[in-house]
Image (cartoon, helix red, strand yellow):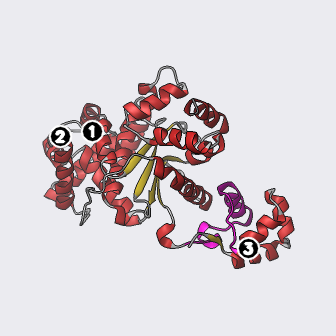
Amino acid sequence: MHKVIHSEKLRQALQARGWTQKDLATELDVTAQAVTNWMKGADFPRPDKLLKLATTFKLSFADLVLSPEENQPVIAFRKKGGAKTTDAHILKAIAMGSLLKPLVPFLPELRSLRVQISSPSTQYDALQATAAEVRTRIGLGGQAVLSYEHLIDQFGSNGAVIAPVLWGEKQNHKNALHILLRQEQVTFIFLNLDTRLEDFKFWMAHELAHVYTPDLAGSEKGEDFADALAGALLFPKTLAEAAYPHVARQSTTAGEIRELQRYAMAHSISLFSVFSEINKYAKAQGLPPLRCNETGIHAVRNSQRGNLVSELLFEPTPPEPAAYMAAAANVFRSTFFTALQRMIKSKGTGAGYVQQVMDIPMQDAAALHGELSR
């Protein structure tokens, strides 16, 4: 069964506004027959028309669309600080997921044997045991620095396709977008390269936790576990145990923060991650918490930010399409653009598809499409 418009909801919305189906067709710049087909369930709007429907009538995706649960893409955002997820954001992400389905046949064959965490728990000792197992799988000891490059192979081995994107440092609502296609058993993870390195590593670890726990995808429990595992992977118990006495013996909160900064810089992670993981360790061991608080930590952290990942990868920025796609393939071992190129050459897919499936400006999509069409 394919997705269909919830015709009764849409009819009610038209009546409330005093519109006819012809009025709606004019508003959306489609034919009256197209609207009739939507109402009958004989056809379904394109993603851009679906988004305009939702925003015009202030209807959520759940109100507007009837869809079998197992066929609907499952999404999770990694939002920018202070950003709010709206129905329009959710609708656009689900539309992106629907558009990704035709791309799946052009991906390399994905492994059927995948790692899954059977009993995910945020309880401290259980979480640390899971983090230790993941680090061992990656080939890292408990006190080694975890880089985002260490995480990359785990994505490809577990049916996840990384799609590095350049969404800008401030203008986009999200810094990462996780789209699980349950029926196809493929996960697409869009990672914004215009992100500070210390944050980028956390988001990659967070997304890997999602990949390991597909049954929790899209749930609040899944988000809580992913955040907890990311922190434990980046600064595990062995590091927190060694760091706690050095930080706690400082005589002032400023001294504590300086010591925390030393560990944050050594591991290229955020000051807040180090602070949080050491306090979690202290609580689990029945030790006094650090004297410094979240407000002070965030104030220092926000005043001292590192480089963007895009700045570390490309000089100058923004990169030319060829350099950008080469980094996707060579740094992130991503098959996304290879599959996109196969699709374009096989089906004659246009730049509009690239624009919608990557959520980027049309000018950038046209430049990428030109490179992929060669």
In this view, 8 is above or below 287? below
Q: Position of residue 237 (x, y in %)?
A: 17, 49
Image coords of residue 255 (percent x, y): 25, 35
Give the foreground label among 3 and 1. 3
Badge 3: residue crowd in 10 Å (few <14, some 14–19, many ≥20): some
The x, y position of residue 328, in whole percent, is: 43, 34
Can the viewer see residue 281?
yes
Q: Which residue is mark 3?
A: 39
- Which label belongs to residue 140? 2
Q: Position of residue 172 (x, y in %)?
A: 57, 44
What amino acid is found at the position of numbered circle 2 in the picture?
Leu
Q: Which residues are magenta?
A: 41-67
Residue at 18%, 61% (x, y): give it: 126
How far apart marks 3 and 2 lie (CA) works out to: 56 Å
- Residues at marks 1 and 2, CA–CA distance in whole angstroms: 9 Å
Q: Which mark is residue 150?
A: 1
Q: Quadrant of the C terminus?
A: top right
Secondary structure under tag 3 reads helix
Q: Residue furthest front?
A: 346
Q: Do the numbered discs 1 and 2 sit on residues whose CB atoms are within 8 Å? A: yes
Q: Amino acid at mark 1?
A: His
The reply to whether the magenta stretch includes residue 11 is no
